[in-house]
Amino acid sequence: MSLLQIHDPRSAPRPIGIDLGTTHSIVAYVPPSGGPVAISDCDGELLVPSVVQYRAVGAPLIGTPAKRGAVDAPIDTIVSVKRFMGRGAADPETRKLGPYRFATDEGPVVKFAVAGDRVVTPIEVSAEILRELKDRAEDELGPIGGAVITVPAYFDDAQRQATKDAARLAGLTVLRLINEPTAAALAYGLERKKNGRFVVYDLGGGTFDVTLLELDDGVFHVRATGGDSQLGGDDMDRLLAEQVLTALGADRSPGRVRYALDAAREIKHALTTSERVVTKLEHDGATAPFEMDRASFDDAIRSLLDRTGAASRRVLRDASVAAADLDGVILVGGSTRVPAVRAYVAELFGQPPLTDLDPDLVVALGAAVQADVLAGQGDRPEVLLLDVLPLSLGVEAMGGVVERILPRNTAIPTEAAQVFTTYADQQTGFEIHVVQGERELAKDCRSLAHFTLRGIPPMAAGLARLEVRFRVDADGLLSVSAKERTTGIEQAIDVKPSYGLDEADIERMLLEAYEVGEADVVARTLAERRVEASRVELATNKALAEDGDLLDSNEQSSIDAALIDVAKARAGEDARRLQATIDALESATHTFAGRRMDRAMQRALGGRGVDEIATDTEHARGIERAHEPLIRSDDEP
Amino acid sequence: MTSPFEVLGLPVRFGIEPAVLETRWKELSKAFHPDRHVQAAPAERRAALNRAVGVNEAYRALRDDLVRAQTILSLRGPDASHQAADPALLMEVMELREGLGERKAQGDRAGIESMAAQVRGDAETTSATLAQSLDETDDLAAAHTALCRLRYLRRFLDEVELALEP
């Protein structure tokens, strides 16, 4: 952190990239000149341990101070909260070796019972970490703009939504959620400007991601993704911790367990640079000598590595790519420092992996690069990240069977429609249970949410034609809309997430977090809407300048009128009225937007015929053979 | 209703280079992907998102040859799309399944593999017929028959793959 920081009050807010990791988190940005840089604290530390300690009195401790106090307050110190995001209280993971006290109230969302009689969800815990990163970035950069936050490619909808909700609670605007391996490749790709096919092998503290990425003329395309969201360096620690606990005796109190895990981690780190570790364990009166050599450690973790091998082979199969076709293997995540892991990866893919960039930082650096691109700042080469649905989406049908709507590895954003009908006369409501996963039965898949359609026009049973649209956005998040076809009436949808917070919960938490009066919340809303109004005015004027010729004079005047309304409302004090004028402007520019898209399409195609493309493609860099399609799901009747 | 071909700006043809399809998809993704419109006004963001979804859906449809063929048939002649399967074809498939069942029971992997090779050859010929009837002779009836046959053969090959799994 610089001592003297004079921020230009007129400078644009800086976009940032955040790696919200299981073990530690990092925030990075791209300075005006040069490559992305991680932001350190006053002590020069780049990594923020993803640890939050709740205290009976005072605000929670975050990061290194929390980590220090972990041994003494194991129940109140939440470590590796990422493993609990989007998880249910009944999941096996929550019962694994971990010294937390879980609140046993109603609802399936995991809740930690911590000091000060507080009950917190993983989302709130993650929000504390994000807030810390935000503060660190603001200290360094001044006002910050949006953030790109990374998630494991294998994260399902519930986990992604939880991440986005945590960002919201922390007061961050999320520009995009991007997959960690894609971010890593972004960091590598720009520096090396390679085209080709890469595997990103990401073994972090808590999750394992393996992804097949294709780089082609600035477009990153995820061909296939896989992994294990319950596999990481933490599991290596757990295996070692068992041995430590046994060495120290029968005590398995939370404090002892926390000590054992910390000791195990240190031993693991030491074995990266030494062939043998000899140490003395000491906790709460018990002491014991302990030693371990690399060979025994390698044996102990072999089964974990084999699980990564199985997931990796599956991904290659899904993408119809052989290991010999790969142009490189990128290593991400602190756990890839373990020599046994590097050797295993080299053998698995038949080539030595790339390790140039710091495996702890590379994801955050890539996120910063993408944040920069999305915020439209700087002159970064144009990159585009095309992602896929990591897990199939389905609907629970009669008999508990899953009817697949969207297969995994479908490019996103995407949409699928299904038509349902009613089974009782005059039925006005309808419930849809959406699940994610590859199994045949809904109970073996992960429940995502229950969507209740309301307002179905009453008819005889079987007559209604409910067209339900399932849309997945570029962040991988699902939204549902429904319309009854014969009447054209749209249904209202109530969403009840299976493992997340609903809108009401979040708004309540936001109010609580601010701890301010109603009036201040209103003022904040007005300020935020004013910023949005300016932005929209700017964007609309820019659009008119570029493509105003697409409009006739009547259409032009109605848009101008709408713009004037927004400007007037922006100068006023009524937030609701301001929002109404913004919405009205959106309606007024609807047709204009459509025409702009048509023009964009013409521009993209450049008037080239198919034959020209074929010739161009042959000569294009990096594509030497016809591409094989992604694996198709069996979605025939 | 815009056809996937229109969405991607491609001529309605069964025979298409996979590389060309992919290039087109990427070009249009560059134009419409939400990440390219982050700073735009809401109406434009929404329009772009809808187009991006359409582009991905069109890509999904055209990438699969069976879906692509069905799409062309639906465009050329809505009546031709819903014919019942030829009983002779059903008989053939049933016999193939029985043959597979027998060889499975006997653990005759070599036998299964030779069945698969034969069916694969058949599928290739059928696919060529399908291409020809759609792109050259414009014979919708023949195309439909070929498509139907190809579907059943592919499904059978899926069963064979399952049977060969350890």
Image: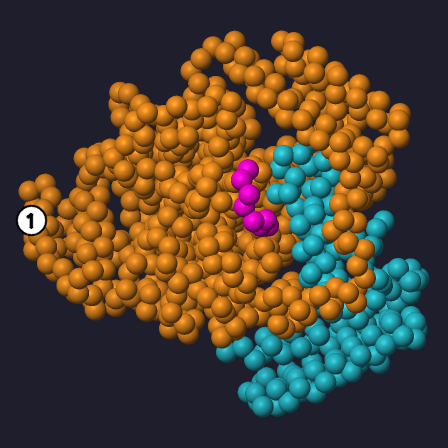
Chain colours: A orange, B cyan
Quadrant of the rendering where the C terminus of chain A is positioned: bottom right
Rendered position, A254 above or below A191 = above
The part of the chain drawn in magenta is A377-384
Asked whether residue A283 is in view, the answer is yes
Q: Is residue A294 left or right of residue B110?
A: left
Residue depicted at 39% across the width and 65% down the height: A353
Any magenta on residue A382?
yes
* B147 or A485: nearer the viewer: B147
Query: For mark 1, does the 10 Å Cα neighbourhood hold few (<14), some (14 to 19), or many (20 or more) residues?
Result: few
Predominant SS along the magenta part: loop
Chain of the residue under label 1 = A
- Asked where in the image residue A18 lies, by quadrant, the reply is top left
Residue depicted at 10% across the width and 41% down the height: A284
According to the picture, the residue beneath numbered tag 1 turns out to be A287
Q: Position of residue A264 (x, y in %)?
A: 21, 52
Quadrant of the rendering where the N terminus of chain A is positioned: top left
Q: Is residue A185 left or right of residue A297?
A: right
- Asked where in the image residue A596 lies, by quadrant, the reply is top right
* B152 or B2: nearer the viewer: B2
* A414 or B21: nearer the viewer: B21
Q: Is residue A287 left or right of residue B127?
A: left
Q: Is residue A94 left or right of residue B112?
A: left
Q: Position of residue A497 (x, y in %)?
A: 55, 37
Q: Position of residue A214 (x, y in %)?
A: 56, 61
Q: Amino acid at mark 1?
A: Thr
